[in-house]
Amino acid sequence: MGVLAALVLVGVLLTVPDGEERRRDGCSGAKVTGWRTDDRMTRELARYGDDNARFDDWTGGDGTRSVRLPDGRTLWLSADTFLDQVYGAVNGPRSRKPNPVWVRNSALVTDRGGRFERTLLGGTDTRPTALFPGTATADGREAWRWPVQAVVEPRRPGSAEKVVRVLLWQREAGQPPWIFGVPRASEVATLSLPDLKLEGVTPIHRPRQADIERRVLYGTSAVTRGGWTFVFGADEGSVSGKASRAHVARVPRGRLADAAAWQFWAGSPRAGGEGGGWQDEPAKSEPILVGKTVQRGATGTYSVVRHRDSWLLLTMDAGAPDGGGVTDIVSYWSCTPTGPWRGPGRVAKPPLPEGAPGAGAVPYNPQWHAEFSRRSGRELLVSYDVNVLRDSGAAIHRDVAYYRPRFLRLTLGQAR
């Protein structure tokens, strides 16, 4: 379901030379120095999912990312989403009704105090559909959209009017090993403010490589710094056991929905100033370094945040020597968005719901939520998704906690 694809597409990221934005000793670095569960946030989302006041809203999902809106509310994005009714014992597992309605994506809204209050969908009250509608291929196969990171930016450069730009991954139904879909395109949706109405979806980049494993989708993370929004992505080589590689693009503020404004990192400038640097052509993009070897790195759904004078990347531990990559979260840091990223630094083994290990449940997709930082930014909220690898359909309906995000609070400090 949803970004459980990250577990199947786990890989490591290869090395490229230092970039033009690298300052060798120009930052203090960042690392995670401690963690604790944020039970209040986990319970709040569970409260909303268990509320049967409406049967056409969210009861579970993954792909969890968020963005703070100008009026203090927060928009939360969700990939594959289950709707309908939840029932069960007050102090026991909560279950979904058999064969619940599900859609490919949705969004949730919290009020200024962090209380979940609405689900955003398409369609009608009696026939809800995905917020970002899908389409079909020429031969009739499903093509759907999974929302990833969102950014609030001016409608156009210099404009006082703000909109929400939502980065989307478009995928199409395929044959094994592409059980989570073939990567099709990176897109940007525009939501109006303050009413959060979908205005349209703009194509940004359709990868054309014959080798499907090297097609890059952008948007797993996006960070605005100065006049630029840096958009991170990855290819999917690990679907067949090869290395998966991270990439980064940048876009001037106010132009995320303008495909012509995107620039892609092509590695260090070549001798004589030719090639490398930021390029307009996405096919020239080169992978960025995460970790020290080709055997260790980040998954395809890593998350990046700016912390003081440094950049910090969070991921499940791809390529861990003890096989703990499916269970452990690690971090990497860099002085620039183009890397190289130093690490890994151990973060946490995220706890699972009661009984989840026996059911085959696993954690994945750790994501920063910097808008919920505390203690002057030294403590950040992180979500991680949960799903079941075997017999997932029955298990995640039998206990709704097996397909819902959970939350940690991480304490940050300097890496050196």
Image (cartoon, helix red, strand yellow):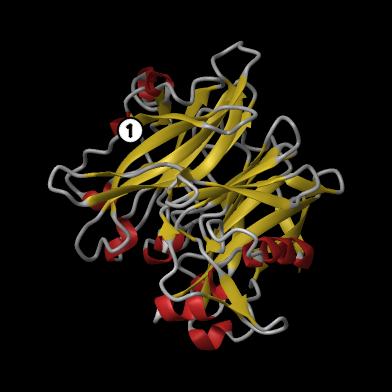
Q: Is residue 215 left or right of residue 93?
A: left
Q: Position of residue 20 (x, y in %)?
A: 51, 28
Q: Residue furthest right?
A: 375
Of 343 and 397, which appears nearest the observer? 397
Q: Is residue 236 left or right of residue 118?
A: left
Q: Residue at x 75, y 38 (%)?
A: 308
Instruction: Name the foreground residue: 216 vs 372.
Output: 372
Nearest to the observer: residue 309 or residue 27: 309
Q: Secondary structure at mark 1?
A: strand
The N terminus sits in image quarter: bottom left
User: What's the amino acid at mark 1?
Assistant: His
Does 74 appear above or below 225? below
Residue 175 sits in quarter: bottom left
Q: Position of residue 46 (x, y in %)?
A: 67, 66
Q: Quadrant of residue 357?
A: bottom right
**Residue 324 seen in the figure:** no
Image vertical order of residue 387 relative to residue 266, above or below: below
Q: Residue lying farthest left? A: 139
Please tell me which residue is depicted at 74% across the width and 59% down the height of the picture.
410
Q: Quadrant of residue 351?
A: bottom right
Residue drawn at x 61%, y 12% as measured from the top left:
159
* Pointer 1 residue: 205
Give percent across and percent down for residue 165: 52, 31
Q: Residue 338 location in percent, x, y?
A: 51, 37
Judged from this view, the residue extending furthest toward the front is 126
